């Protein structure tokens, strides 16, 4: 059984089916929240059914704290009734984790015999019978209730042979430590992209794919298509780099709209989409319907990435901190938010943590001290290049940068205010002068690098 590394696991089964033993075998003691144990906490008696409501109030409270801290959580209770599972599904959605159901659907007689051997289980066979009937009524509807993964074990042999593997979320690239070159909205300006890549030290290898000799990787921040003069070529450059492992890419709202159009969905042909469709129509004639491959590539892109032990998060649109590194449907759809809805930016805390600073349309989140954010101390950001809106959309950027240094305003809107902002600009200016960090608009990036 493969489960997401960050998930809410709900054990389901009648009394005596072995849920607690199963949980102890496969999960850490700190990951397991037992309803019986919570009854004991609130009443000194794990079998005191009159304390059930209070026990589940405690259980749900602890589950909230664990999920908020991005900790896998296992709920050990019968959970055979839909009304018992519903609040757990809601908890998973609230904290943007994937709900998993593991069902122990063992024979009633076996469960009853086990209960009779335990002195603390002095109830009759009708209890197990009712629970088993409720379970069987629920089996087919678990996915409709909202469980993303459902595993059903129907015999002792299956339970004993079960193995659980924890799978990292698609956005988890914490083991990647860079260096990274982060490039924002290209919008079909392939000539400028190739100049930028060459300036950063990338060159085409024997497979005609851009690669850095020192192992740098590009992180493309979406909006590859629309507006520019060489849109299909842009997508090909990025796709080839991602497919060969020399780059990462997250989707932008323009990319998703283009994908939907290629797949025949009804969309408005606005904001440069017509340019993409026209150019791909011509390009497809000589490249075997490449637009389909481009749409498939975009469809497989991950909404955001978490790099460098969680110190760097890259997404296309503004993303709340509690959504970063999570895997719910709402998190996966964050790239569908239009950049024009998110240009007011996020907030930089006094101690330097970024909740979600919006740079034009691309967003970069750093979970380190602000000095580390601009290149002093973390290997992944010794040199970060942010090229935004290569198509020349610099009006929004001018609102967020100081004219003298042409820096985006990584500013603070808290009690530290002006002092913190000035400190960040002071350090950023030093690193720009040393050539270790640059944040520039797309139309300025090449001239600034030349300087």
Image (spheres, helix red, strand yellow):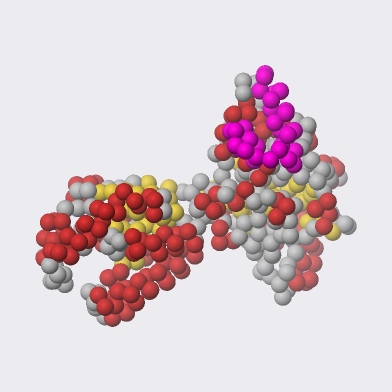
Residue at x 73%, y 34% (from the top left corner): 274
Pick whichever, 149 or 7, lies toward us. Answer: 149
Work out whether residue 219 can be spotted: no
Furthest-right residue in this view: 404
Quadrant holding the C terminus: top right
Residue at x 18%, y 65% (from the top left corner): 127
Q: Does 329 sit above or below residue 236?
A: below
Q: Does 201 sit above or below residue 101?
A: above
Q: What is the x, y in percent for residue 5?
A: 43, 53
Q: What is the x, y in percent for residue 21?
A: 24, 60
Q: What is the x, y in percent for residue 423?
A: 77, 66
Furthest-bottom residue in this view: 43
Pick whichever, 173 or 64, lies toward us. Answer: 64
Pick whichever, 329 or 174, lies toward us. Answer: 329
Q: Is residue 275 magenta?
A: yes
Residue at x 88%, y 57% (from the top left corner): 404
Q: What is the x, y in percent for residue 342?
A: 70, 56
- Magenta part of the protein: which range? 257-286
Residue at x 56%, y 61% (from the top left corner): 322
Work out whether residue 122 can be spotted: yes
In this rendering, position of residue 416 left or right of residue 149 = right
Q: Does 290 sit above or below residue 15?
A: above
In this rendering, position of residue 239 left or right of residue 108 = right
């Amino acid at each position: 059984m493969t489960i997401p590394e960050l998930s809410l696991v709900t054990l389901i089964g009648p009394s005596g089916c072995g849920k607690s033993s199963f949980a102890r075998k496969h999960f850490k003691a700190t990951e397991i929240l037992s309803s019986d144990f919570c009854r004991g906490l609130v009443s000194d008696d794990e079998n005191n059914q009159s304390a059930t409501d209070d026990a589940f109030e405690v259980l749900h409270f602890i589950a909230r704290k664990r999920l908020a801290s991005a900790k896998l959580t296992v709920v050990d209770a019968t959970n055979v009734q839909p009304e018992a599972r519903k609040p757990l599904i809601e908890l998973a959605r609230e904290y943007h984790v994937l709900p998993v159901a593991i069902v122990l659907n063992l024979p009633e007689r076996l469960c009853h015999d086990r209960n009779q051997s335990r002195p603390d289980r002095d109830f009759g066979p009708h209890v197990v019978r009712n629970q088993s009937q409720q379970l069987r009524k629920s089996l087919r509807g678990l996915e409709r209730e909202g469980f993303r993964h459902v595993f059903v074990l129907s015999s002792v042999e299956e339970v004993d042979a079960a193995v659980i593997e924890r799978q990292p979320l698609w956005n988890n690239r914490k083991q990647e430590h860079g260096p990274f070159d982060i490039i924002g909205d290209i919008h079909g300006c392939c000539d400028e992209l190739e100049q930028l890549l060459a300036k950063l030290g990338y060159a085409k290898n024997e497979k005609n794919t851009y690669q850095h000799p020192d192992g740098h990787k590009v992180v493309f921040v979406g909006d590859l298509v629309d507006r520019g003069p060489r849109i299909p070529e842009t997508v090909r450059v990025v796709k080839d780099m991602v497919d060969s492992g020399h780059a990462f890419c997250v989707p932008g709202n323009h990319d998703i709209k283009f994908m939907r159009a290629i797949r025949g969905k009804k969309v408005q042909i606005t904001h440069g989409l017509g340019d993409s469709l026209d150019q791909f129509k011509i390009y497809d004639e000589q490249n075997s319907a490449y637009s389909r491959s481009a749409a498939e590539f975009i469809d497989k892109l991950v909404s955001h990435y978490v790099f460098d032990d969680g110190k760097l998060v890259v997404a296309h649109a503004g993303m709340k901190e509690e959504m970063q590194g999570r895997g719910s449907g709402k998190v996966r759809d964050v790239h569908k938010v239009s950049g024009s809805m998110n240009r007011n930016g996020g907030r930089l805390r006094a101690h330097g943590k970024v909740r979600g600073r919006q740079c034009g349309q691309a967003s970069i989140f750093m979970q380190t001290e602000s000095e580390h954010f601009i290149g002093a101390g973390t290997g992944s950001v010794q040199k970060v290049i942010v090229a935004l809106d290569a198509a020349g959309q610099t009006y929004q950027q001018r609102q967020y940068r100081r004219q003298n240094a042409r820096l985006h305003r990584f500013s603070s809107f808290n009690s530290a205010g002006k002092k913190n902002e000035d400190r960040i600009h002071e350090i950023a200016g030093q690193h720009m002068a040393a050539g270790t960090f640059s944040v520039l608009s797309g139309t300025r990036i090449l001239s600034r690098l030349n300087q």
